Image: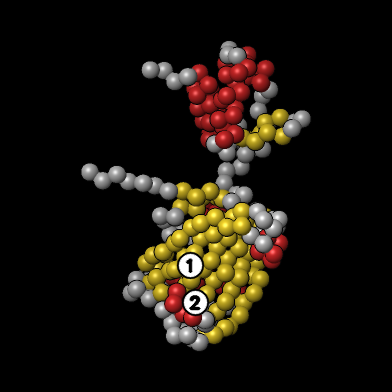
């Protein structure tokens, strides 16, 4: 059975976007021009365009036209990669801004996450992660001082995972993550350039080394303006 005509048109435009024939930021032909090109009704063209808008490939600008949208950086929760790796792989420019870098005696709740004694020294680091100079993720990371006595602000401006695996020669095994929506207020909203009362995705992660030692606890607030979350489900059998 043949696909409906609007799906065929959407597939054709999707391939043109993927191949670069329709590059990011380019304006699409008008509805009338597309009608003529594909020899279909305006309703069919609108359905095809709406599908691509919903799939985050196009965006409309009132009074101007329809444009090809830049792809979002993808956060694959089933593959442990860092922010720098994820964003760079999408052809975008990652950067970090250190908000605070402190030494603290860990509280009961943080000690439980890191498998430490209450009062053990930890780094408390708040970083703003940017994509193409736009704030996208706010991170609050806790790391045991005993495990990383030489940790520096310079290392945290780049890739935390590079520091752990390349500088410290430690092997990361996994990250246990939990995700939920959250309404943000105050300083978090301000740092993410959002309004109080808006929603973000909160991801709490606990990282372990190959020997089972916990090396980090991080709370992420994802703005999801330039990020998408990807899942892969496998069926056994």
- State the image quarter where residue 67 is shown: top right
Image location of residue 3, percent across then percent down:
44, 20
Residue 151 visible? The answer is yes
Height in image: 205 above or below 23? below
Q: Answer whether labels 2 and 1 touch (C-beta < 8 Å).
A: no
Q: Secondary structure at mark 1?
A: helix
Quarter the C terminus occupies = top left
- State the image quarter where residue 65 is shown: top right
| Classed neighbour count for the residue bearing mark 1: other residues with Cα under 10 Å, few (<14), some (14–19), many (≥20) | many
| Spatial separation of the CA atoms under disc 2 and disc 1 | 20 Å
Q: Residue furthest right?
A: 63
Query: Which residue is disc 2 drawn over?
Result: 110
Height in image: 56 above or below 38? below
Instruction: Determine the residue positioned at 77% across, 30% down.
Output: 63
Q: Is residue 157 left or right of residue 147?
A: right
Q: Which mark is residue 217?
A: none
Quarter the N terminus occupies = top left
Label located before the other in sequence (2 or 1): 2
């Amino acid at each position: 059975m043949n696909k409906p005509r609007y799906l065929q048109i959407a597939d054709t435009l999707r391939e043109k976007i993927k191949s670069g024939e329709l590059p990011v930021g380019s304006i699409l032909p008008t509805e009338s021009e597309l009608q003529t090109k594909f020899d279909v009704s305006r309703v069919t063209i609108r359905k095809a365009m709406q599908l691509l808008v919903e799939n985050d490939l196009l965006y409309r600008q009132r009074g101007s036209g329809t444009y090809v949208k830049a792809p979002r950086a993808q956060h694959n929760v089933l593959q442990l990669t860092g922010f720098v790796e994820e964003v760079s792989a999408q052809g975008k420019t990652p950067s970090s801004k250190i908000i605070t870098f402190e030494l603290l005696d860990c509280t009961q709740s943080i000690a439980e996450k890191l498998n430490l004694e209450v009062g053990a020294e930890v780094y408390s680091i708040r970083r703003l992660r940017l994509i193409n100079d736009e704030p996208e993720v706010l991170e609050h990371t806790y790391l045991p001082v005993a495990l990383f006595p030489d940790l520096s602000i310079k290392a945290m401006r780049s890739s935390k995972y590079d520091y752990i695996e390349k500088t410290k020669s430690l092997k990361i095994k996994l990250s246990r993550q939990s995700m939920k929506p959250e309404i943000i207020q105050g300083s978090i909203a301000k740092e993410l350039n959002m309004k109080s009362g808006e929603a973000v995705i909160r991801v709490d992660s606990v990282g372990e080394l190959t020997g089972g030692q916990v090396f980090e606890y991080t709370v992420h607030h994802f703005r999801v303006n330039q990020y998408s979350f990807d899942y892969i489900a496998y069926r056994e059998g």
